[in-house]
Image (cartoon, rainbow, N blue to C red):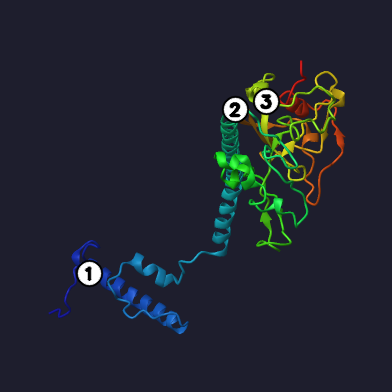
Amino acid sequence: MDLVPKVQASSPHSKTWRSIRRFVRSQHLQHAGAHWSHELEGAGIFAIKNPCSRLSASARMPALTGRSPAFTLIELLVVIAIIAILASLLLPALGTAKQKAQGLACLNSQRQLTLAWQLYTDDNDGELLCSTSRSSPRAWMTGALNFIDSNRSNWDIEQDIKKSPLWLYGANSPGLFKCPADTSVVKPSAGPYAGRTIPRVRSRSMNYWFGGQDGTDMFNGSGPGWRIYLRGSDLIEPGPARTILFIDTREDGITSGGFLIDMTGYPDALERIRFYQDWPASYHHRAGGFSFADGHSEINRWQDERTMPPIQKSGYLSFNPVPSPNNKDILWMQERATRTIQ
């Protein structure tokens, strides 16, 4: 009698084989978990307390591989490079937006200053303010800017700005007297701001041909016969809409309240045209702000490089005539300054 039990061959897909495979797999995982737990605990990282836990294999993978979720150096450098590229694309756009915003603010403040001038004119029976004066109450602005640290006209709005007749007619904000793109500064040697670097208070001047100096053409450098506007009715030619009233002036060219547009060479000797002491600003990307006697304002883009020489930070650009033959920018201003008396 055969006492050895006979084991019948069974299919690999039978229930018995499936049980055997599960048993072997569980023994293998237990062995692998114990091995990694021992290795990581010896390295001082952590120990797997229960390698037979019911966490899924994907959940146990970081612990079994020992990888950290932090950035690698290469990944960090890639992120920094992407940020740098985005910044290089956005910064020019932001700079352009800032210039446009300053241009709009400039136009708005020019209009408000011109409106105050119109209100004064209407309230004084058409009598116009003088562009510059030594003592007349009819001057729109007294005092002069320069590079002397003790000159209060450079930094104290109480000195000249608040004494302007326009202050009482709505131009009662210091920002109206200066282009927002003007960054000129001064360091007073006395007063409450002594030793501190602060902004200068004015960049705007009035067309010299409005009242001249105390009602007359004291300059007389353009030759005789040019009209001085004393009353609103004098604005015949080129007319209010084409007659410059206020001009933004360079920090190294602004002095008194008047801006002299030298009429030498106009209209048929353009080889003789020139700048004389006063130079227009180019704060708006090669362009300067203007307002006109009819109340509108505009920004004019300069075409000639000679209109935009480098800024002189420590003194005036020039007190003497600077010839600039056939300069289209000077011609543009001459056409909008005055005319000869007929």
As shown in the figure, which amino acid type bears the numbered disc 2? Asp
Instruction: Compare marks 3 and 1 and give the one earlier in the sequence.
Output: 1
Label 2 environment density (alpha carbons within 10 Å; few <14, some 14–19, many ≥20): few
Label 3 environment density (alpha carbons within 10 Å; few <14, some 14–19, many ≥20): many
Q: In the image, 103: left or right of 334?
A: left
Instruction: Compare marks 1 and 2 and give the one earlier in the sequence.
Output: 1
Q: CA distance from mark 3 to mark 1?
A: 103 Å
The residue identified by callout 3 is: 243
- Looking at the image, which is closer to me, 152 or 94? 152
Instruction: Compare marks 2 and 3 and give the one earlier in the sequence.
Output: 2
- Looking at the image, which is closer to me, 136 or 68? 136
As shown in the figure, which amino acid type bears the numbered disc 3? Thr
SS at badge 3:
loop
Q: Position of residue 66 (x, y in %)?
A: 45, 72
Q: In the image, 161: left or right of 325?
A: left
Q: Which mark is residue 125?
A: 2
- Looking at the image, which is closer to me, 118 or 25? 118
Q: Position of residue 151 (x, y in %)?
A: 74, 54
52 vs 217: above or below: below
The residue identified by callout 1 is: 19
As shown in the figure, which amino acid type bears the numbered disc 1? Ser
x 61%, y 27%: residue: 126
Q: Position of residue 216 (x, y in %)?
A: 77, 30
- Looking at the image, which is closer to me, 60 or 316? 316
Furthest toward the top, the residue is 342
Q: CA distance from mark 2 to mark 3?
A: 20 Å
User: Can you tell which of label 1 and label 2 is closer to the viewer?
Assistant: 2
